[in-house]
Structures are given as structure tokens and as C-alpha cells.
Amino acid sequence: MSKVVICDHPLIQHKLTFIRNKETNTKDFRELVDEVATLMAYEITRDVPLDTITVETPVATTESKVVSGRMLGLIPILRAGLGMVEGMLKLIPAAKVGHIGLVRDHETLQPTEYYINLPTDAANRQLIVIDPMLATGGSAIAAINSLKKRGCDQIRLMCLIAAPEGVKAVQDAHPEIDIYLAALDDALNEKGYIVPGLGDAGDRLFGTN
Ligand SMILES: O=P(O)(O)OC[C@H]1O[C@H](OP(=O)(O)OP(=O)(O)O)[C@H](O)[C@@H]1O
Ligand SMILES: O=c1cc[nH]c(=O)[nH]1
Ligand SMILES: [Mg+2]
């Protein structure tokens, strides 16, 4: 079974409080999501393989580490996943970015894919699917299905906030996928929103609705 990692660094938990607060305006919300994405990028890349190279310091020649040639790819789920991309690229500037557009029907909660554009070498990359919200899990599962259909098999999932229902659904559908979260919340409400959550991530990021 995969692991679920809660990135509970104090700075992440602090910023998440302001992200949750309904009084936080769009500009601050966007900046905070960006900052938390940077901090989570640090955690999700903790196990990337390293190579050893020789480097000359002003004092001596020494062996030192660099991130190995293994390539990363970021796959934000549109729209809300976009809010986390720049923050991650600050730490992983060489990553390529692919996009999957999914929208969840407000009544049925079923996701529909309306767009996909991946790096041509996506199947050779370690991919990180990014979405602030893991609610029923339908969108994350659909995104991972889409990636697997195109030959990608190195995939992990990164979300700000998840409901237990969403975590279980992803684990049932894709048991090998590791999930990185800033918080695991209590439940879903009758409208499919995470409680306590943060509301509609896309609307809060882009000022819609
Ligand atoms: O786990 P699920 O039940 O599938 O719900 C989570 C999805 O819902 C939201 O997207 P939404 O459909 O609102 O699209 P948007 O990002 O364009 O607002 C969110 O960003 C996730 O993609
Ligand atoms: O709470 C939720 C659930 C799904 N999508 C959101 O943006 N928020
Ligand atoms: Mg939305």
C-alpha cells in the first residue's frame, strides 16, 4: 500500500490557517497557496536520487551531490492546480509541466476531462499530479487514469487538503500512488465540499463566483 504523508511543518500549518480563513482575499490566498506549494515541494522531493560529482571549491577538490538525471514532471489539474505550479517550480525549475483539465459536475460530482497536454517524454518522468483539493477523489483518479493510459507509471499526488473519502478512493483505485497532503480534514458535506476545508479552491484562487 502507498503512503500518505502529511506535511505538517509549522510554517505550512500556519499558512494553511490563513488559506482556510474566508476573510483572506484573492491576492493573499494566491500568495499563500504558492508559498505552501514551495514548502511541500521540499518534502515531496526528499527522496529524489542524487549523483556524486567532483567540484572544485576555492580551497580543495571534493566529491559533492547533485540531483540525478531522473526527470520530474508537474501535472496540475486545471484550474485550481495551476495555483501551486509556480511555487513548486521555484524549487524544481527543470521540471516540465503538463496540464489536465477536469471539471466536477456540481450535482453528480463526476469529473469530465476537457483538456490534456503532456510533455512528450512524460512517460519517462516522475510525475507529480497537483490539485489543492482531494474531495471525492474522482478528479485525481481520472487524472491518474489518463496518465496511465499514456504510459506514465511513476506518479505521485500532491494536494493541500483531502477528505478521508478521497484518500480512500485514490488508494482503492491506485494502491501504489503516494499521496502528499498539508492536511487531512474531517469529511465531505452533502454538496461534496471538504469540511472544514477552504471552500472552492478555483474560485478563491481566481476570484470567480
Ligand atoms: O475530488 P473531487 O470530488 O473530484 O473534487 C476535487 C476537484 O474539485 C475542484 O475542481 P473543480 O471541478 O471545482 O474545477 P476548477 O478547478 O476549475 O474550479 C478541485 O480543484 C479538484 O480538481
Ligand atoms: O471542498 C472542495 C471540494 C472540491 N473542490 C473544491 O474546490 N473544494
Ligand atoms: Mg472549483
Image: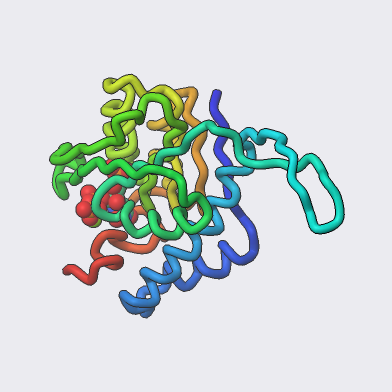
Residue at the image point whose x is 74% and y is 39% from the top:
54
Q: Where is residue 140 in the image (x, y as percent from the top left)?
A: 33, 37
* 170 is higher (above) or lower (below) than 190: above
73 vs 45, left or right, is left
In the image: residue 146, left or right of residue 51 = left
The picture places residue 43, in percent across and down from the top left corner, at: 60, 48
Q: Is residue 114 above or below residue 87?
A: above
Residue at 24%, 64% (x, y): give it: 203
Q: Does the rendering let one see residue 191? A: no
The quadrant of the rendered image in which ligand 3 is seen is bottom left
The quadrant of the rendering that contains the N terminus is: top right
Q: Nearer the viewer, residue 42 or 125?
A: 125
- At horizontal 38% and vertical 31% (from top left) the residue drawn is 169
Rendered view: 76 above or below 199: above
* Residue in the foreground of this view, choosing between 24 and 62: 62
**Does residue 108 show up?**
yes
- Please name whichever residue, 198 or 62, is drawn nearer the observer in this view of the structure: 62
Q: Picture quarter containing residue 2?
A: top right
Where does the image place residue 96, in percent across and percent down from the top left? Answer: 38, 43
| Number of marks in the rendered image | 0
In which quadrant of the rendered image does the C terminus lie?
A: bottom left
Please name whichever residue, 67 or 137, is drawn nearer the observer in this view of the structure.
67
Q: Residue at x 46, y 35 (%)?
A: 156
The colouring scheme, among rainbow, by chain, secondary structure or one colour, is: rainbow
Q: Where is residue 123 in the image (x, y as percent from the top left)?
A: 37, 25
